[in-house]
């Protein structure tokens, strides 16, 4: 059974249809990259999986259990499905360490000393242990994004959603964040990434899904999508990236 199953979900904002009968499944330990033009529904899809947005129709299941519709414990759901945004969203009045230990100590009532040890180990792993007592405004964008990822990992999510996490970074900072994501992939973290980083999608993902007009227009292995796409819309999107020097 797939870890995540999405069946024919549709999402409207008013009269504007953002997702159109979209279906997708993700197996445990898979890394799936969502690519496509701006406005194709990548970020909305991630927000629907995490229930930050409500679907208009269709169903989403985790390990066969429905997570859309009424009667779902959203607090529990968001502990199991972590999400990291492009804008970091760290609490500016809290240190790096406090940002990372807040959720497990308050939502799960885990012992502070135990959580602190785990947070320091993760910060050490991403090269930020010495920044533990700094405030976010003293960190670079790449460092803040790594802290945001550590904060999500502190909840031991079964699924991690990454929404354009490098788009707000200066080019020289992109590599340090993608290196962390690569490390998570090698350790078996199940992830779905909405990304414009085609080199990363080509290198580190198990599957690539090209979204167009709110649907999964084409999906396959990185080799299939980037070297032999079947659909003309996919080919046109990739041609535009080549012309722009981004592929």
Image (spheres, rainbow, N blue to C red):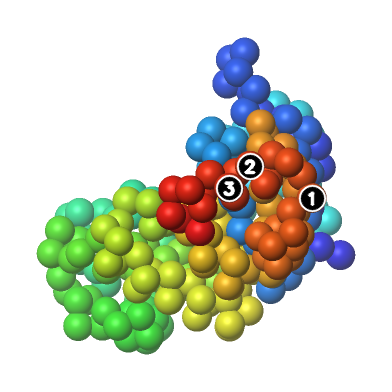
Q: Residue furthest right?
A: 1
Cβ–Cβ under 8 Å for marks 3 and 1: no
Among the two numbered marks 3 and 1 on one chain, the one whose residue lies closer to the N terminus: 1
Choose between 155 and 191: the one closer to the eye: 191
Residue 60 spot, x, y in % from top left: 75, 45
Give the number of the disc on residue 230. Answer: 1
Residue 107 drawn at (x, y percent) = 46, 60
Kind of element beneath mark 1: loop
Which residue has dot 2 on it?
Answer: 236
Pointer 3 with pointer 2, Cβ within 8 A: yes
69 to the left or right of 126:
right
The answer to whether residue 167 is visible is: yes
Question: How many residues crowd mark 1 within 10 Å: few (<14), some (14–19), many (20+)?
Answer: few
Instruction: Return the x and y of residue 104 as percentages of the image width and height.
Output: 44, 67
Q: Nearer the viewer, residue 244 or 206?
A: 244
According to the picture, the residue beneath numbered tag 3 turns out to be 239
Looking at the image, residue 22 sits to the left or right of residue 44; the answer is right
Q: Quadrant of the N terminus?
A: bottom right
Q: CA distance from mark 1 to mark 2?
A: 11 Å
- Label 2 Cα neighbours within 10 Å, binned few <14 / some 14-19 / many ≥20: few
Instruction: State which quadrant residue 213 falls in.
Output: top right
């Amino acid at each position: 059974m797939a870890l995540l199953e999405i069946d024919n979900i549709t999402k409207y904002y008013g009269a504007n249809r953002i997702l159109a009968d979209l279906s997708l499944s993700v197996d445990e330990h898979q890394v799936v990259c969502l690519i496509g033009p701006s406005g194709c529904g990548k970020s909305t899809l991630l927000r629907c999986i995490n229930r930050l947005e409500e679907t208009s129709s269709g169903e989403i299941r985790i390990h066969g259990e429905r997570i859309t519709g009424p009667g779902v414990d959203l607090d529990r759901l968001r502990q199991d499905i972590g999400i990291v945004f492009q804008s970091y969203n760290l609490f500016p009045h809290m240190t790096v360490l406090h940002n990372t230990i807040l959720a497990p100590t308050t939502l799960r009532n885990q012992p502070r000393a135990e959580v602190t040890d785990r947070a320091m180990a993760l910060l050490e792993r991403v090269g930020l242990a010495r920044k533990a007592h700094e405030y976010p405004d003293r960190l670079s964008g790449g460092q803040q994004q790594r802290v945001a990822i550590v904060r999500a990992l502190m909840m031991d999510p079964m699924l991690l959603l990454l929404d354009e996490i490098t788009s707000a970074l200066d080019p020289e900072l992109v590599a340090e964040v993608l290196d962390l994501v690569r490390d998570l992939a090698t350790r078996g973290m199940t992830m779905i990434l909405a990304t414009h980083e085609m080199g990363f999608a080509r290198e580190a993902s198990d599957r690539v899904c090209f979204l167009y007009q709110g649907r999964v227009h084409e999906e396959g292995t990185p080799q299939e999508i980037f070297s032999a796409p079947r659909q003309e819309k996919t080919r046109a999107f990739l041609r535009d990236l080549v012309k722009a020097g981004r592929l």
